[in-house]
Each structure stands twice: as structure tokens, then as C-alpha cells.
Image: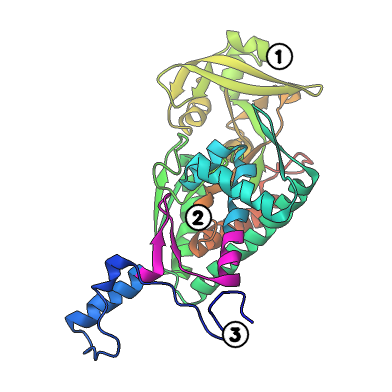
Amino acid sequence: MSDTPGVEDGEEKKAPTPRGLRRLLPPEGAFLPWGGPAAKKCCIAVILGYLRISKNGLISGRLSGKWSKSMHAITQMEIFVEVVRQGGFSAAARSLGLAPSVVADRVAGLEKRLGVPLLLRTTRRQSLTEAGEAYFQEASRIIKDFHALESRIVDSATALRGTLRVTAPNPLGQRWIAPFIGQFASSHPGIATHLTLDDRFADIVAQGFDIAIRGGPAIDSNLIGHHLFDTRRVVVASPAYLDRHGAPGHPDELAAHRCLVFNTQSHLQAEWRFEHAGAARKLRVTGALAATDSGLPVAWAVAGLGLAQKSWWEVSDHLAAGRLVTVLDAFEPEPASFYAIHPVSRRQSRKVALFVEGLVALFAEMEGGLRPSGSSAPPV
């Protein structure tokens, strides 16, 4: 016997036709000429009847039975994972474009369906229960695999084409990123790439960039970072400058020297990093010369105009040629890291994945050649 009153086993229960759609449907058994007005009205009726728009604006199909329950479970799972990642219902609601009440209802429905609490709620914060932690870890993997599967299916049927917008610091972009883009374009002629060279930190999402090359990891939950390389940070000066002014023996002595600084603002200050005996220190220096172009302090240092703190790769050629020498080596800070960063929304993009994978491989091959000659120092 069927569980539904009035429906025998094997018989499908028909949903009643919404009143507003009845006038669009033709009489039962009527002939519909292909492309005629009646056929178009019928198609509209079928689509509108199949789709329903919920109060929060989401469109969902009229699925029944196990399919409906499965889709509902996936939605609950994705919302719960986003709540944990964002650290609360309000932040998750903003990320998903839903009302906070909808997010809270979905999580409550998930807990009710599972029969166990997943979150411990207080007036100020939410924390995961033991069951919630286990569910979050497994659900995150399932959702990642689900999106990866869909991406592979779509990409397998779609040729690589479109546009990539990339931004990078000027010296790094000219030295490595621009040549790499040339090789990438040759391998993937269907992809057009626009490179913006700018030493300022771009708002990747707001400015519409697909990939940004920058120092430091992604600290925004809407961004994903892929490590490219590490670089030493050294203070350099020309031999001529040191002959005239002497070499500083301690970072505190920089106040008596001409510092050459890079910053993205219209002032002369910059923050230089040092480390000694395991203690890290940030020192604010005032420059005799300052520029928004990160390459200019190197040129000024070579010209004998002062001291600059730069990445090893920016000055390695000058050091090898004797045009610059390093000072304050005993206070050298921890290496800085460079990353390829892209919005979370681009994580399933095959174009982005190929570009980033190529960059990672490029710097992995170059890493040995980026170390100071004969040195066991960290990679630069």
C-alpha cells in the first residue's frame, strides 16, 4: 500500500496546477504546433510550474521524495560549513546572500535531522561540539569534492578560453611574471591575459582581478593563497656611500643615515623589519628619499644616495657585481613569502588553476638558483 492516501502503489501523485497557470495550459490532448503561441504558453506554464521562488529569493525545483530530501540536506550542509568558516550566522548570511534567520533555521533544521547539537551557542559566540567538529571536517571535504566534480565535468566539455586579469608588484612582474605570461599565452592561445603592474596592494575582489602576486599570505577568508617562494630581506648600500658615512652596526643607528624607502603613500616613512637573537622588531625609519615605485630605492642605493632594505632577488645582481654590499647582517629578519592569491569564487576556474600551477612550478625550478652563492641561507 502507498503511504499517500488515495494513491495506489506505483501511481504517481500529481501536484495540483496553480490557479494562475491554468489559463496558460491548453486543453488536455490538444495538438500544439511547434513554435506556435499555444506551445510557447505551455512551455512557460511547465517552467513556472516546475520552478518555485522561496522567500529568500532562491529558485528550487519541485523535487519530491528522496531527491528533495537529498537536495535539502546538501543545502543545510553547505550553510553549516559556511557558518563555521565565517565564525557566525550574520557573517555567513552576508557571504551567502541570505537572511540571518534563514541561515539559523537551516542549521537548526540540520541539527534536528541529525538528532545531535553541532553548535554551542552563547550570547557572544558559537563553538563546535565534538559532533559538530567531526561533521564540519567531513562535510568540508564532501563539498570540496562535489564542486571539484562539477568543475571537472564542465571543464571537460569546455575549451579553455576567456580572460585572466593578473596584478603583480612592478619589479617582480617585469622580471618573472611577464615572461611567464608570454609562455602561458603560447600554450593557451584561447586565454587573453591582462597584467597590471602596481606596487600597491589591490583590492582583488573589488577591482575584478583573478590572480594577484603579493608578499604575505591571504588573510581574507574570501581569498586563497598559493605559496610561490621565500626571499631574504637585506639592507644594502653602495661602497661609495659607506666610505663617506660608515656602515651602521645596529638598526638604531639608521636614524643618523640617509634611508631610501618605498611606500604607497605620500610620506617619507616606512617600516623596516629586523630580528636578533630570536626577537623580531619593526623599526619605523624616515627616508631622505621615498617613492611609490619599489624599484627606485635600489637605483638610488646604487647611485650612492643611501641605504635601502630590499628583497634579495631585487639586489642580487648588484651585489654580485659589487655595486652594492649588505649591512646589518646580524639583524636580518625572517624571510618574506610571496604568494599567488585569488578569490575563493575562482577556485573552480580551470584557467586560474593552470596559471597558478604554472607559477608554482616555475618558482620551484628556480628556487636553487635564487639562493646566495655558496650560502645555506633560506631561499630567496
Magenta part of the chain:
49-73
| Whether residue 81 can be seen here | no
The residue that disc 3 covers is: 9
Give the farthest residue toward the front. 6
Q: Nearer the viewer, mark 3 or mark 2?
A: 3
Kindly state the secondary structure of the residue where label 2 is placed.
helix
Q: What percent of the width, then of the height, locates residue 17?
A: 36, 72
Q: Quadrant of the N terminus?
A: bottom right
Q: Amino acid at mark 1?
A: His
Q: Amino acid at mark 3?
A: Asp
Q: Which mark is residue 332?
A: none
Q: Quadrant of the C terminus?
A: top right
For disc 1, the marked residue is: 250
User: Which sits earlier in the primary sequence, circle 3 or circle 1?
Assistant: 3
Question: Residue beneath label 2, please?
Answer: 346
Q: Is residue 230 left or right of residue 131?
A: left
Q: Residue at x 55, y 68 (%)?
A: 150
Using residue 287 as the reference point, say whether residue 144 is left or right of it. Answer: right
Q: Position of residue 123 (x, y in %)?
A: 64, 27
* Residue 353 falls inside the magenta stretch: no
N-term-proximal mark, 3 vs 2? 3
> x, y percentage for residue 234?
65, 29
Q: Where 232 falls versus 276 (above or below)?
A: below
Judging depth in this view, the residue of 190 and 45 nearest the camera is: 45
